[in-house]
Amino acid sequence: MSKIRVMVVDDSALVRSLLAGIVNAQSDMTCIGAASDPYEAREMIRNLDPDVLTLDVEMPRMDGIDFLEKLMRLRPMPVVMVSTLTERGAAVTMRALELGAVDFVAKPKMGLSRGLNEAAGELADKIRVAARARVFRRTAAATPAATAPPRAASSDPVLRSATPLAGGVRTGTEKLIAIGASTGGTEAIRAVLTVLPPDFPALVITQHMPANFTRSFADRLDSLCRIRVREATHHERLLPGHAYIAPGGLHLRVERSGANYLAVIDDTEPVNRHRPSVDVLFDSVARCVGPNALGVMLTGMGRDGADGMRRMRDAGAYNIAQDEATCVVYGMPREAVLAGGVHESLPIQSIGAHLIERMRSMAGVTHRI
């Protein structure tokens, strides 16, 4: 089996050497070249045709974001970003994922050599995933925050939190949507959330992501959506019109207190090697929400969440998976389907609208969007 051909782009000679060493230490990959800036990288890509690119964010002459934008328009290929563990680094990384980067690895500001070597296994795993990922050509930038629709109250009475449903259940206070995602998930989550009305039932989301990055992710989504999006905090009430994202490095669970759902944040052991874990979230939703829940499994590598989604279905929840054709990595959705937890698979462009239709169906209303 041929090795994964990796090219490194970074303005630091030390980082180029460290990354090349990590790549070459893997039995299934090889570093075919290293460039110090995007102009050099452009020529090397033409000549060497790598399978995967690792790309620094901050470089001279042309930064990594500008280069990535051009690359994904003209010569789409799998890219793993190398980002600094800073607030600015996190915000720029979100932009890189928006432009089509498959994933990212965070490098520390201090102790660079030790930090990158400690992340060697993570980097190698992400390169392997990137080599198998489906990369989509980007023809235009995503909708900027300035053009996001206003957060006006919905004119649709079906989705108002005060609308009684069958059996006295109300959409906003009883219904809950749980979403799990990993590789490629930041843009998949954006595609779902941006179509939802401002008074949609509460959503809880676990996206595999390290600490310091989920706040920037939530802030970016909040600027694009009509619902409010925030990083979840311990024991806060889950409100209609809000989406709550598991903080990086911590689990998010749901518990019930009277008529309310609460977020529970903890640092218990990783599950399926992940913290936050989708299985942890879905298991809690199965126990506390049952048939009032809708589950959504989006693109991602591995099988985290597959068993939890099956338990959600057994508890009466209705579950949707992203289809293979629109996944960056069809791993977690496939495993959820194989585990018997999924009712239907849909393209990412249809999932948000379908959630709205399901809410209307649960409300006993049949008219179209």
Image (cartoon, helix red, strand yellow):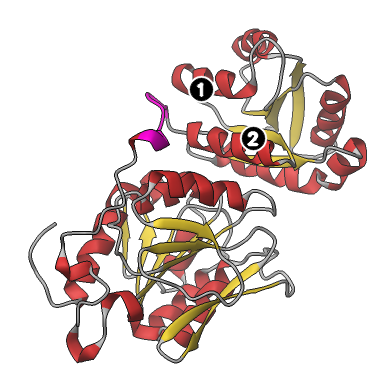
Left or right of residue 130, residue 291 in this image: left
* First in sequence: mark 1 vs mark 2: 1
Badge 1 crowding class, 10 Å Cα cut-off, few under 14, some 14 to 19, many 20 or more, is many
Residue type, label 1: Glu
Element at badge 2? Answer: strand
Q: Residue furthest front?
A: 152
Which of the pair 289/258 is nearer the observer?
Answer: 258
Residue type, label 2: Val
Of tags 1 and 2, which is closer to the observer? 1
Q: Residue at x 21, y 91 (%)?
A: 167
Picture quarter with the N terminus: top right
Left or right of residue 85, residue 213 in this image: left
Residue 58, image x, y percentages: 70, 24
Element at badge 1? Answer: helix
Q: Residue at x 58, y 46 (%)?
A: 216
Residue 30, image x, y percentages: 76, 29
Residue 113, image x, y percentages: 91, 36
Whether residue 102 appears in this view of the structure is: yes
Q: Which residue is mark 2?
A: 80
Q: Which residues are magenta?
A: 137-146
Left or right of residue 323, residue 100 in this image: right
Main SS of the magenta segment? loop
User: Is label 1 in contact with label 2 (beta carbons under 8 Å)?
Assistant: no
Splitting the image into 4 quarters, where does residue 266 fall?
A: bottom right
Badge 2 crowding class, 10 Å Cα cut-off, few under 14, some 14 to 19, many 20 or more, is many
Q: Which residue is mark 1?
A: 69
